[in-house]
Amino acid sequence: MNGFGHKFTFTTFGESHGKALGCVVDGVPAGLKIDEAFIQEEMDRRKPGKNEFATARKESDKVEILSGVFEGVSTGTPIAMVIFNENQKSRDYTNVKDLFRPGHADFTYYHKYGVRDYRGGGRSSARETAARVAAGAIAKMMLKELGIVVQSGICEIDGIKASSIDFEYAKTSEICALDKDKEQFQKDAILVAKNEHDSVGGVALVNVKNIPVGLGEPLYFKLDSQIANAMMGINAVKAVEIGEGVNSSHKKGHKNNDQINKDGFITNNSGGILGGISNGDDINIKIYFKPTPSIFIKQSTVDVNNNEVNCELKGRHDPCVAIRGSIVAESMMALVIADMLLLNMSSKLENLKKIYN
């Protein structure tokens, strides 16, 4: 499957070293003001080659809208967007075309399909996430009309955890750090790994504010299950926590329950979701990224004939994929919320009467 969503949907296409990649976003209500400058700003947040903490691959990631927009507003028809690749170096991968890179999808893709695009991983490359950010920008425009804010940042790198959370600071940080006091330690950890031809993992935090009560479709399309689905579909993500997550299993019920008074919930251990439905409190999600598997240390593997060989990678790779991954996670969250908003419109008869009477 290359698509996501139920009412507000998107499908991506393209490969890391192909001519282009892009997406088709469907279900966008007509009349939404489409700000192309904002789409590009979102792309620029994720694009490679900006600093020493990301891959050196230089891509402008300029988005071209092909359909679904007329005179600056959505027409209600599918919005197609394309991003042309500009800086592929496919020759960097010729030495690994017949072997399986440890930690990558090479082994599983080959055994599933029998063919494989070895140039940067083809479809399995994180390059595909550029299209998700473009789609997410459209979702964010819709959320903005309803006052809903989605934001993200890095709360942990190589085990160095943030002690404070500042989403505004993360917007200015080269590594999207949420804690300015821990930022330099996190940067140092990335550069040490990079200089050792290795990589480090990290944790992103995504927050949603001003969310209405009632989003989520029980029992099999719960808000939290779809958020987890969206996040686990991002390259290199190995775990997702909602609210207190793992910590909730260490607590007693009277400590974990979010008690309520006339002003609302006193705590937010649930992460803003109860019974798979939003409760109106902030949604808080942590996304755990493994270390980038593309490292420049000799590793053992096998080739397509099952011969044992050594893998020595070339190319340009992120020493910490979590940094740019946090923007992708933020975009996926916006897409889930947009989808749930449209689905929730038919949950009550009175909503339909407002439209059709």
Image (spheres, helix red, strand yellow):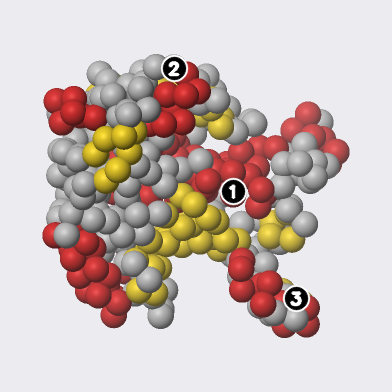
Q: Position of residue 230 (x, y in %)?
A: 54, 43
Neighbours of disc 1 within 10 Å: few (<14), some (14-19), many (20+): many
- Residue name at image x 35 percent, y 54 percent: 291
The residue type indicated by label 3 comes to Asn
**Residue 64 vs residue 217: left or right?**
left
Sequence-first tag of 3 and 2? 2
- Residue at 39% across, 17% down: 115
* Residue 114 numbered mark, or none: 2
Q: Label 2 amino acid?
A: Gly
Amino acid on which disc 1 is placed: Ile
Which quadrant is the N terminus positioned in?
top right
Which badge, 1 or 2, comes first in the chain's sequence? 2
Q: Which residue is mark 1?
A: 227
Give the Cα separation between the discs numbered 3 and 2.
50 Å
Image height of 297 relative to 188, above or below: above
State the mark number for residue 257.
3
Give the percent coordinates (x, y) of residue 180.
29, 75
Picture residue at 46% right of the left edge, 31% below the top? 108
Q: Tell whether 298 sits left or right of 133.
A: left
Position of residue 321 relative to residue 112, above or below, is: below
Q: Nearer the viewer, mark 1 or mark 2?
A: 2
- Residue 326 picture location, percent across and down: 39, 53
The answer to whether the residues at label 3 and label 2 have Cβ atoms under 8 Å apart is: no
Which secondary structure, mark 3? loop
Which of discs 3 and 2 lies nearer the camera? The answer is 2
Residue drawn at x 52%, y 19% is: 77
Mark 2 lies on a secondary structure that is: loop
- Quadrant in which residue 338 is drawn: top right
Q: Residues within 10 Å of mark 3 (few under 14, many from 20)?
A: some
Between the C-alphas of marks 1 and 2, the distance is 31 Å
